[in-house]
Structures are given as C-alpha cells and as structure tokens.
Image (cartoon, coloured by chain):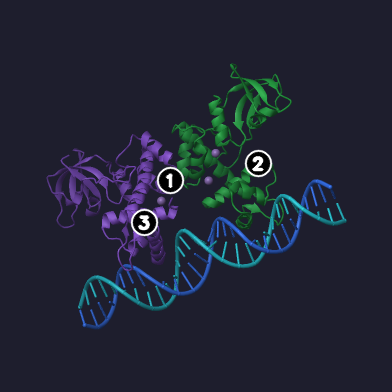
Chain colours: A purple, B green, C cyan, D blue
Amino acid sequence: MASHTVENYLKALFALANEAGEVGISDLSDHLAVSKPSVNSMAKALQQDGFLKYEKYKPLKLTAKGKKAAALVVRKHRLTEMFLVEQMGFGWDEVHDIAEQVEHVKAPAFFDRMDELVGFPTVDPHGSPIPDAQGNVLEIDCVKLSECAVGEKVSLVGLSQSSKSLLTFLDSHGIALGHTFDIRAVEPFDGSMTVVHQGATDQTFSLKVCERLLVNKEA
Amino acid sequence: MASHTVENYLKALFALANEAGEVGISDLSDHLAVSKPSVNSMAKALQQDGFLKYEKYKPLKLTAKGKKAAALVVRKHRLTEMFLVEQMGFGWDEVHDIAEQVEHVKAPAFFDRMDELVGFPTVDPHGSPIPDAQGNVLEIDCVKLSECAVGEKVSLVGLSQSSKSLLTFLDSHGIALGHTFDIRAVEPFDGSMTVVHQGATDQTFSLKVCERLLVNKEA
DNA sequence: CTCGATTGTTAGAGCACCCTAACAATGTAG
DNA sequence: CTACATTGTTAGGGTGCTCTAACAATCGAG
Ligand SMILES: [Mn+2]
Ligand SMILES: [Mn+2]
Ligand SMILES: [Mn+2]
Ligand SMILES: [Mn+2]
C-alpha cells in the first residue's frame, strides 16, 4: 500500500488533472504546500512505482494504475465525509479535515461498513461523486450557476472547490444541496446574480459565489 | 502532537509498565517488533521531549507527561473499539487492528463524538478501562479466573492480553463479558477448570485460558 | 567469583520525505 | 527575436525512523 504521503500526492494529482487538465510541478507544489524540488523528486519516485508518467519539463500524467489508486483514496475520503455527516451528526463544513486523515486508514472493512451504513451513496455531502470500489468515477452533469441565464430554473447539485468559508457562507444563507434557484437578473457590470431561493426569498450572489455553485437545469 | 510512531511507543511503554512493572529496552523491542538499537535511540528522543526518564542500563520510566500522553492514545484506541462494536456492528475480535490505526487521527471532535454516541463508556469491548479525557485510568477490581477456588461464583469482567485467537475461542464457546461461571472443579495436574457457564452448560478450560479471564467474585 | 547468557550501547548506514540556493529551460510580451 | 517571468532541475543537506554488526555491561548459575 502507498504511504500517507504518496496517497496525498496521488489525490492532488487526480484532483488537479480533473479541473485544470494539465498538471505541472508548480501546481502540485502550491496545492500540497511543499517545495518544487520535493515534488520533483516525488514525481520520479511515483514514476518508479508506475503511478505516473514523468518526462523532464513535461506535464505530469497519472497512469491507469495511478488514477485507480487516487480514485480509491478519494472514495475513502468521501465515504468518510458522508459517514461523519449522516451517522455522526457533523456539519458539512466540519468533515473535510477529519476525512483528510481518516482516508489513510488501511482497513477495507472499515470503509465497506461505512458505505453500507450510509446506504451506498453516490455523492458526498458537498455533491462530489464517490468513486466505486473499482475506482470508476461517475461524471456529474452540471454547470456553474454563473453560466446560466435569466429566466432559468436550476437546482444546486454540487460545489467546485468547497472551502470551509464557502460552506459557512452557504449555511448562513440557508442554502443546501438540492435547493432551487429562479434566476431573476444578472448584473452586467460585475456578473452578480439575483435569484429566488427555494421559490421564496430573493438573494443576490457575487460572481465569485456563482462560479462555485454547480447546478442542474430543469429544476 | 506526537507522531504516529511516538504514539505507538508511548502506548507500548504504558501497557508494559502496567503489566510487567519494569520495562526494558528488549521488552519494547519485542512488543513493537523493532530492533533494540532503534528502541534505544527512540528512548533518548522521548527523554529529550520529556516523555521518559532514561538512564543507561536502567529500566525505562514514563514521566507524568508521558503517562498522560499514553493514556490519551489508549483512550482514543478504546473509544474507537467501542464505537466500532456499538455503532458499526463489528465483532469484538475485528476491532483492534482498525483501532490501532484510527487512534492516530488528530481530531478531538471525532473522538468526542464517538464518546457521546456510545454513551460515555468506561470500558472497551474487551473489558479494559477507558482513560478519561484528562488521562486518568480507573483500576478495575478483578482477579484471574485461575486464581479462584472451587465453589466460587464469578462473572467475566475483562481479559488480559486479548488476542484475536482468544476472542475467537471465546466466541466459539458462546462466552461474552458479563457471563457467569460456577467453579465446579480444578484439576491439580494441569490447572484446568471445570465450570458451569451461565448456570447452564458445563465447560472445561485449560490453565492458559483461565489465566486470561479476569473475573469479579460475587456474581 | 567467574563464565556465559542476556541485555544494552555504539557506530555506521539507508530510506522516505522535506528544505534552500543556484541554475537551466520554457514560454510570452514587446 | 530578445528579455524576463515562470517553471523545472540539480546539488547538497537535514530530520525521523529504521536496520545490522560489533562490542560492553549486567545478572544469575554454578
Ligand atoms: Mn473533502
Ligand atoms: Mn489526506
Ligand atoms: Mn485493542
Ligand atoms: Mn497504533
């Protein structure tokens, strides 16, 4: 099994590839808060173990083996988050840091039981998909709220880069997954949007917020 | 916070001191499956951090700080075991290895919630006491079954060194914590005991088994 | 008291992971 | 096409934890 450290590298590689396409040494260095030379030598080590294809000055590419290993760590992370929320009563803004550690436990039965107890979920508490036991990830069909037009009716299905502060913001506005928005107006100047939340209250969100809300049309 | 490795050393030190009194480098070496030179240098490091009093060729002695740190790891381990059994449906013979890893998670809220969800237990699934949040351990009043005499009626309150094979043995004989035994006979030749289990079935246990069953007189 | 077994220590090295300083390659703006 | 910013690499070193080989201290039996 991969070490705690290696698992975190793989997860970061996987996440960055899925949002930025190409992953460079610097991206990983920023994301993991580790120096570039450290990433560089880890890249060589991961290549050695067949997790990565690495060529000098070229973007890093996970191999099939690397992708699967990464997806399985993501699976453990997201199952843990789901378990923490559903079975242990934590808030969706409290679970990421705990899951960041629990994901490294080597005990398949532990995660299998979590899966069972929360009813084999397909998404985590932030709407991100949970890879299956083989490491396959289901793509979720959604767009950023910021890309929607006036008049559309959408429902919140996920978040892109759910940070603690975003989650707190959403909590304070009473917003949760599944809630609906009727888009009333888009301000051309700064891209802020005015919507009707849950068919009831009017709310205005900055572009920054709208870019991080992933929604599904046809509410 | 102490590293995964240091936490395991502290826990071993604590456990060995509580059962063997004096703890030597070799004891720890055996218990942790690590070479004696490794233990030797770790002893110096732990001394450096104030967890241990170390003098050449003398037994190792945990300081108050060391004892508290160790007890808090034990607390996390045993709360985890309790949680795994009570909330997740694992058997008492499956939880130790999982807890051995989960105990190293740095997230007080995680363990506090476990504690709450299982109702602030004082003993783990094997009858061992759970230290409190300050690191105080309650001594449990018990004796080995092997030290009891014919005619006594006792109840099982714990196990000394509960190994997987012991737990499996007990399971296969339908024995659980809280069960009662009427001591019918003690074989002078090999120390084996014949008892009435739960006031119903007759069973005979070898000395080896009887030495690991901790019981309470006056059932 | 002495010898041999046990236990503990030192020396020397390796592996995983991390760092800074210096330099090289790459890509882009002018 | 050059100049500069960005990105990546090498060199060299450090920490935590581990090991084996060799040697030293301690303890108990005879
Ligand atoms: Mn997360
Ligand atoms: Mn992690
Ligand atoms: Mn245990
Ligand atoms: Mn452990």
Element on which disc 1 rests: helix
Q: Residue at x 56, y 39 (%)?
A: B132
**Residue closer to the observer: B88 or B121:** B88
Mark 1: give few (<14), some (14-19) or many (20+) Cα within 10 Å: many
The amino acid sitting under disc 2 is Asn
**The one of B215 and A52 positioned closer to us in this rendering:** A52
Query: Gap between marks 2 and 1, in whole Å?
Result: 30 Å
Q: Are marks 3 and 1 in contact (CB under 8 Å)?
A: no
Q: Residues within 10 Å of mark 3 (few under 14, many from 20)?
A: many
Q: Secondary structure at mark 2?
A: helix
Q: Is residue A10 above or below residue B194?
A: below
Mark 1 falls within which chain?
Answer: A
The residue identified by callout 2 is: B18
Q: Position of residue B11 (x, y in %)?
A: 58, 45
Question: Residue B26, relative to residue C29: is it above or below?
Answer: above
Contact check, label 3 and label 2, Cβ < 8 Å? no
Residue located beneath label 3 in the image: A51
| Element assignment for label 3 | loop
Q: What amino acid is at disc 3? A: Phe
Q: Exactly how many numbered labels are in the figure? A: 3
On the same chain, marks 2 and 1? The answer is no
Residue B69, given in percent of the width and then of the height, sits at: 58, 47
The earlier-in-sequence mark between 3 and 1 is 3
Q: Which mark is residue A102?
A: 1
Q: Is residue A61 left or right of residue B113?
A: left
